[in-house]
Image (cartoon, helix red, strand yellow):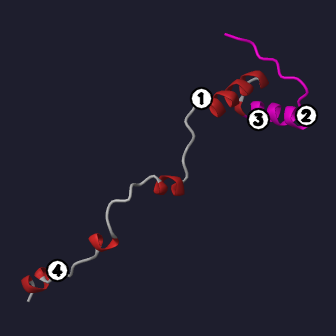
């Protein structure tokens, strides 16, 4: 495994990292590794709008028009 040294980090970021680490019951270093892994290696979730944009265009709106089916009314009359 490689080592990573990050210099010149704002004190507010360091405090937030330490607070988050304590909430998870781990060291700041372990929390830092976890954050890097999540940000860089895990697939990003797509928004609903992004998923909708990926649906292929498959026909015209008229292809999906509702057709009135009178079969049910004939059965119950």
Residue at 76 percent across and 35 percent down: it is: 20
**Residue with the mark numbered 2:** 10
Q: Quadrant of residue 8?
A: top right
x and y, in percent, of residue 56 in the image: 39, 55
Q: Position of residue 31 (x, y in %)?
A: 72, 27
Disc 4 versus disc 1: distance between alpha carbons? 51 Å
Q: CA distance from mark 1 to mark 3?
A: 20 Å
| Residue wearing tag 3 | 20
For the residues bearing labels 4 and 2, Cβ distance under 8 angstroms? no
Tell me which residue sits at (14%, 84%) in the image.
Answer: 70
| Residue under the point 85% across and 35% down | 13
Q: Earlier in the sequence, mark 3 or mark 2?
A: 2
* Number of marks: 4
Residue 10 on the magenta segment: yes
Q: Nearer the viewer, mark 1 or mark 3?
A: 1
The reply to whether discs 4 and 3 touch (Cβ–Cβ < 8 Å) is no
For label 3, the SS is helix
Q: Are marks 3 and 2 in contact (CB under 8 Å)?
A: no
Q: Which residue is mark 1?
A: 41
* First along the sequence among labels 4 and 3: 3
Task: Give the SS element for disc 1.
Answer: loop
Query: Looking at the rendered structure, which numbered label has been put on residue 69?
Result: 4
């Amino acid at each position: 495994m490689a080592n990573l040294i990050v210099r010149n980090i704002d004190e507010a970021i360091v405090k937030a990292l330490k607070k988050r680490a304590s909430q998870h019951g781990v060291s700041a270093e372990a929390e830092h590794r976890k954050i890097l892994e999540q940000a860089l290696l895990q697939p990003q979730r797509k928004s609903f709008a992004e998923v909708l944009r990926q649906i292929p265009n498959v026909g015209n709106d008229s292809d999906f028009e509702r057709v009135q089916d009178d079969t049910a009314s004939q059965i119950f009359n």
